[in-house]
Amino acid sequence: MAIEVAEIVCEKATRLNAQGSSVIRHWRPGELSAHVARELSDKDGKSFHGGPYRSVIACLFTDEPALSFDQAEAELATHEFGPFTQITAGYLLFSYQPASQSYPVIGLQFRT
């Protein structure tokens, strides 16, 4: 099994914040699923060394301050990604949520 990890983050907001601005990205409907689709496609196209692997799992992490678990879950619940040639499963992981005392995870749905 191979596990590929990537971060779902607004690179423009990150760059502006590093330059001293105070910017928060507000994700509009459809933007998260498009960002996740691009990230999964990029990961599916890379060479995984040490294989072959029975499964390749993409773990995408986000800590975007204006992206809630509920918002992401609602958008991704009906979206299917792929098909992919290498990636067999994917998850979007969130940082610790005090309200639920958990690290929420959304299982991504893949087309076969």
Image: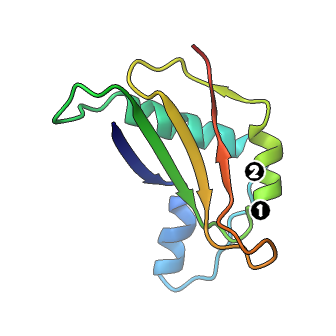
* Figure quadrant of residue 31: top right
Where's residue 55, x and y in %?
39, 29
Q: Residues within 10 Å of mark 2 (few under 14, many from 20)?
A: some
Left or right relative to 76: residue 110: left
Disc on res. 7: none
Q: How many marks?
A: 2
Residue matched to label 1: 68
Quadrant containing the C terminus is top right
Seen from the viewer's position, the closer of residues 20 and 89 is 89
The amino acid pointed to by label 1 is Ser
Taking the spot 78% from the left edge, 47% from the top edge, the residue there is 73
Q: Residues within 10 Å of mark 1 (few under 14, many from 20)?
A: some
Tags 2 and 1 touching, CB below 8 Å: yes
**Separation of marks 2 and 1 at Cα, in angstroms:** 6 Å
Residue most extreme to the top: 112
Left or right relative to 90: residue 79: right
Taking the spot 24% from the left edge, 34% from the top edge, the residue there is 48
Q: Is residue 29 visible?
A: no
Vertically, is 71 above or below 102? above
Where's residue 109, x and y in %?
65, 30
| Circle 1 SS class | loop
Vertically, is 76 above or below 11? above
Taking the spot 57% from the left edge, 34% from the top edge, the residue there is 37
Where's residue 53, x and y in %?
29, 28
Disc on res. 72: 2
Quadrant containing the N terminus is top left
Left or right relative to 7: residue 95: right
Vertically, is 27 above or below 85? below
| Circle 2 SS class | helix
